[in-house]
Image (cartoon, grey):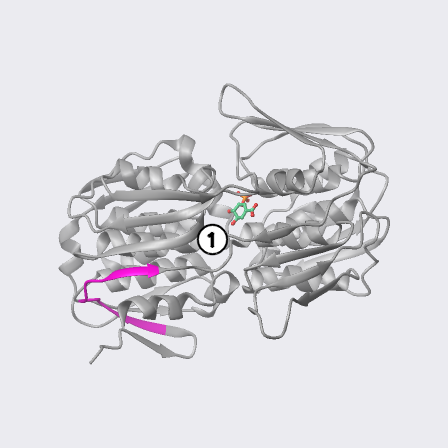
Amino acid sequence: MTQDLLKFNHDKVLVEGLSKEFSAEIEVPGDKSISHRAVMLGSIADGNSRIYNLSVSGDNLATVAAFRKLGVNIKKQNSGGSKKDFIIEGVGFYGLKEPKSVINTANSGTLTRLIAGMLAGNDFFSVLSGDKYLNSRPMRRIIEPLKLMGAKISGRGGDAYTPLAISGGGLQSIFYEVPVPSAQVKSCLMLAALYAEGDTVIYESKATRDHTENLLKFQGYPVGTEDSPSGGSFITVKGRHTGGLNPFEFIIPGDFSSAAFFIVLGILNKNSEITIKNIIINEKRTGLLKALKMMGADVDTVVKGMSPETAGDIKVKYSDSIKGIALPPEIVPDMIDEFPIFAVIASFAEGKTTVTGAKELRVKESDRIKSIVYNLNAIGIDIKELEDGFEINGNPDLKCAGKGLPKKLNSFGDHRIAMSMVIAGLILKNAKLEIKDINCINTSFPEFFDTLNSIIK
Ligand code: S3P
């Protein structure tokens, strides 16, 4: 007889502590960041691209819908095959068509910011708008540099927010230093640079995820990358390259950010271990593994494939001596999406964990510093909000604290807060957590509860 630890009631879930020990091997869906880029760059390639294991999360389906609206034929590979294998009939560099209505970018900051760069280079009119969360996220960070390239783009609130209106074309190359570490801003400018006259050079003082660079190179497009001695990176993109972009075949590796929830569950749950197969192992994404090793976790990675992205298996084991750390601020961008789940492991570690230099967390799908502090406070964790991070006095004994009425938590519409709190609920052996607004999990990981049930049931 298995115990049902997850009880659903409309948009809420009640989570009970997990008493089972497990040894599991799982896969998680294709990487969200790479899936966006594969659809975008496949759409403007010269011919048909075959993509396997595309993420079919809400965010990525919004990207597929957006490019269909721009006139690209995107279809499932074959009726008998996986629902995640697609063919994109690339229309070439200048083949996108003016959309007849507003492009809905849903909850996705990556879609909004990257497609804005591409549309700024295309000689037609377009409007982008998303959901209530997306429409309050900052857009000036892309509008300003796009305007420097000569783009005709404007946004609500004096260029602060979506909706964005774009009359594309006539771009010039620029040299631009990205003021905040942001792969979305960098990639937006790289996609605009494809359509600009001359070579655009982008400098980031801390290198961020390089999936746009990797895929463009894989497609034979002239992109140069050079590391700066201080940990930054110069990216040079040739404008209007006459050779265009080659179509490609790509098996998208699993999403590290989705794997992170199971990595932490495996480390915190007594006498357990978990292997996550075929995951992206790109060091600009796996900063969490560095942090976990610093905390004393048993983490092992085996690289299996390299092109265009490094992929492999990650294995973690339970450890009863996880220690709090002062997280080095330079690894913050390499684990920028993992702070909600990192806060969970820090809560059950011995001693103090401090996160600083992470102000960007305030402008994610929610203000993640506030969302983390609110929820962990409600559970009884000793956490303090900092302007650019948080401080947690962790305590392994808290795993057994609790009882009484379910603690009421809130995802604030943020998928990664929701999933992190589900993991916290499984680790709190005696307490129950009721988490509201959990449908947002579909934006990145619709298979989350099925994957979880395959381990805990
Ligand atoms: C992403 C970049 C990051 C990350 C987001 C995905 C991307 O955002 O938080 O989930 O795919 O480029 P920023 O560029 O705003 O840091």
252 or 160: which is nearer to us? 252
Side (left or right) of 103 relative to 292: right
Residue 162 x/y as whole percent? 67, 54
Residue 234 x/y as whole percent? 61, 26
Residue 177 x/y as whole percent? 63, 28
Q: Is residue 182 something that shows in the picture?
A: yes
Callout 1 secondary element: loop
44 versus 389 height, above or below: below
Side (left or right) of 230 relative to 370: right
327 versus 27 height, above or below: above
Range shown magenta? 13-25
342 or 293: which is nearer to us? 293
Quadrant location of the C terminus?
bottom left
Question: On the image, which quarter does residue 140 sit in?
Answer: top right
Question: Label 1 sits on what residue type?
Answer: Asp
Q: Mark 1: give few (<14), some (14-19) or many (20+) Cα within 10 Å.
A: many
402 versus 372 height, above or below: below
Residue sitting at x 30%, y 38%: 354
199 or 274: which is nearer to us? 274
Question: On the image, which quarter does residue 403 sit in?
Answer: bottom left
Residue sitting at x 19%, y 63%: 21
Q: Is residue 102 something that shows in the picture?
A: no
Question: On the image, which quarter does residue 77 sit in?
Answer: bottom right
Residue 362 painted magenta: no
Residue 349 x/y as whole percent? 21, 46
Residue at label 1? 255
